[in-house]
Image: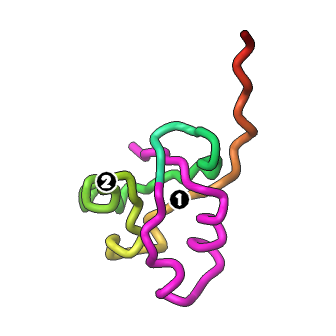
């Protein structure tokens, strides 16, 4: 079973387009549900879950470099729709 986390919008570029390990390996803040500033939904794959989710998600940070198979870590990442404002 996959796990969804929510990352800042810049994370997609960091994870998908950079070949420089000093860029993609930096820890990224995450949330368990979408909120302001965390609108990129990432689906962590089976490889991540097998090595232990607490190993790659620690103290509010996602560590993409801790997976032995980075290509299998994030199954997908997409921008989710904007957050709805609460009505009074």
At which x and y percent is residue 58?
30, 56
Relative to residue 83, is residue 69 depicted above or below? Answer: below
Of mark 1 and mark 2, the one earlier in the sequence is 2
Query: Going 57% across and 87% down the picture, which residue do you hit?
Result: 19
Relative placement, left or right, of 60 versus 10 is left
Circles 1 and 2, Cβ within 8 Å, touching? The answer is: no
As for residue 2 lying within the magenta part, the answer is yes
Magenta residues span: 1-29
In front of the other: 13 or 59: 59
Relative placement, left or right, of 55 versus 61 is left
Q: Which image quadrant for residue 52?
A: bottom left
Mark 2 element type: loop
Q: Which image quadrant for residue 18?
A: bottom right
How many residues crowd mark 1 within 10 Å: few (<14), some (14–19), many (20+)? some
In front of the other: 61 or 12: 61
For the C terminus, the image quarter is top right
For the N terminus, the image quarter is top left
Check the image and name the residue furthest to the front. Answer: 88
Q: Disc 1 and disc 2: Cα gap in Å? A: 22 Å
Relative placement, left or right, of 73 versus 49 is right
Which is more foreground, mark 1 or mark 2?
A: 2
Disc number at residue 59? 2
Query: Going 38% across and 75% down the picture, which residue do you hit?
Result: 65
In front of the other: 17 or 9: 9
Task: Report which residue position mark 1 lands on.
Answer: 75
């Amino acid at each position: 079973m996959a796990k969804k986390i929510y990352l800042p919008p810049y994370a997609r570029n960091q994870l998908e387009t950079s070949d420089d390990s000093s860029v993609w390996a930096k820890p990224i803040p995450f949330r368990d549900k979408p909120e302001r500033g965390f609108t990129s939904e990432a689906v962590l794959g089976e490889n991540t879950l097998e090595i232990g989710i607490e190993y790659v998600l620690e103290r509010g940070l996602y560590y993409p470099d801790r997976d032995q198979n980075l290509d299998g870590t994030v199954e997908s990442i997409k921008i989710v729709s904007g957050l709805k404002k609460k009505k009074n």
